[in-house]
Amino acid sequence: MQGRNLLIAGIAVFLGLVAVYLANAYFSGMEEQQEEIAEQQQLARIVVASQPLAFGQQLTDTNVRLVNWPSDSVPQGAYTSLEQAMMGGRVALRPIVPGEPVLASKVSGDNGRATLASNLPEDMRAVSIPINDVSGVGGFVRPGDVVDVILTRQIPGEGAQPTDKMTTVALENVLVLGIDQVADENNTEPIVSKTATLQTDIYGAQKLALAREIGVLSLALRNVENQEVGATETVVANDLGGAGRYVYRRMGGAAPAVAGPSYSPAPRGASSAPQQASAPARPRGPTMSVVRGTEAETYSVEALRGY
């Protein structure tokens, strides 16, 4: 009885080994067949994603695979072997969808370090600006979105008051790289954040750095398909209605008063005709008097224009 059991176990092991051998032979034959078909049809073998790859996810043999690709349309930077693609523990630098070629520009180098700097084009910079729930479009701005950057600041001029504001578009069509410390474009949940990291050139980076110091920055979310730029205007309080005039400049001293006629004795030998005192010069154009206690100051006002 014991010998019979050993015989059955031996046969089972033998059949298992045969099955493994046949499976390996089958898949090896399929791979060789695919390579032969690729050679006959002038196809190349490149690495594509077999599963969705998120930012920072490591490439493995379970999420990438080799497929046939027309030789005359192989993307630049495509990998031709799994070993080459996974060498050094490469990770995705941006989301990659299934079937999308894995390119050198979309993955890290050796040692698998996913950094924002490695994801920047050579001529671009990453700049962070402060935002809140209002200036950040209620938390709906996410990495991968495109925005305009709006600057609100005080109107320059010696007669301007702290409440005299103007709004301009500092930058247009800017890519959002990250919100706070999140750079994953697959994360689409709205979140109230404190900083937004934007991609711009060096001149745009300088403008943002200056704008942070002189005013308040806000983001305006825009359609990614809308590439129109340049059609913007400066907006001031007058454009909101009901603010047709502004303080042009301060007139020093008290409010001028027009003196009445007066007479003085004429010198000997001079004509005794009465002399009328001349009135002080009044400011040209409309004016406004502001009384503080017992002192009055006069300001010249003009229609708001030129900004």
Image: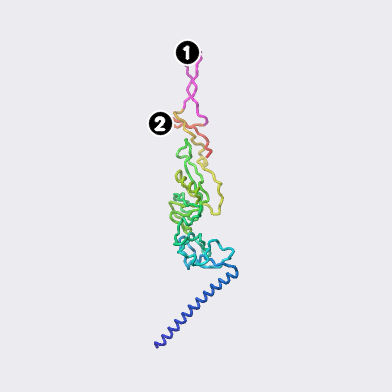
Cβ atoms under marks 2 and 1 closer than 8 Å: no
The residue under label 1 is: 267
Which corner quadrant holds the N terminus? bottom left
Instruction: Inspect the magenta stretch and tell me whether residue 87 lies in it.
Output: no
Instruction: Inspect the magenta stretch and tell me whether residue 258 lies in it.
Output: yes
Residue 39: numbered disc: none
Residue 216 percent across, percent down from the top left: 46, 45
Residue located 52% across and 41% down the image: 239
Residue 134 percent across, percent down from the top left: 46, 49
Residue, far right: 41
The disc, 2 or 1, on the residue closer to the chain's N-terminal end is 1
**SS for dot 1:** loop
The residue under label 2 is: 293
Q: Nearer the viewer, residue 66 or 140?
A: 66
269 up-or-down from 128: above or below: above
Residue 168 percent across, percent down from the top left: 51, 44
Q: Is disc 2 surrounded by few (<14), some (14 to 19) or many (20+) residues within 10 Å? A: few
* Dot 1 amino acid type: Pro
Residue 206 percent across, percent down from the top left: 48, 47
How many marks are shown on the rendered structure? 2
Left or right, 29 with respect to 179, comes to right
How is the rendered protein coloured?
rainbow
Residue located 56% across and 52% down the image: 227
* Dot 2 amino acid type: Gly
Q: Which residues are magenta?
A: 256-285
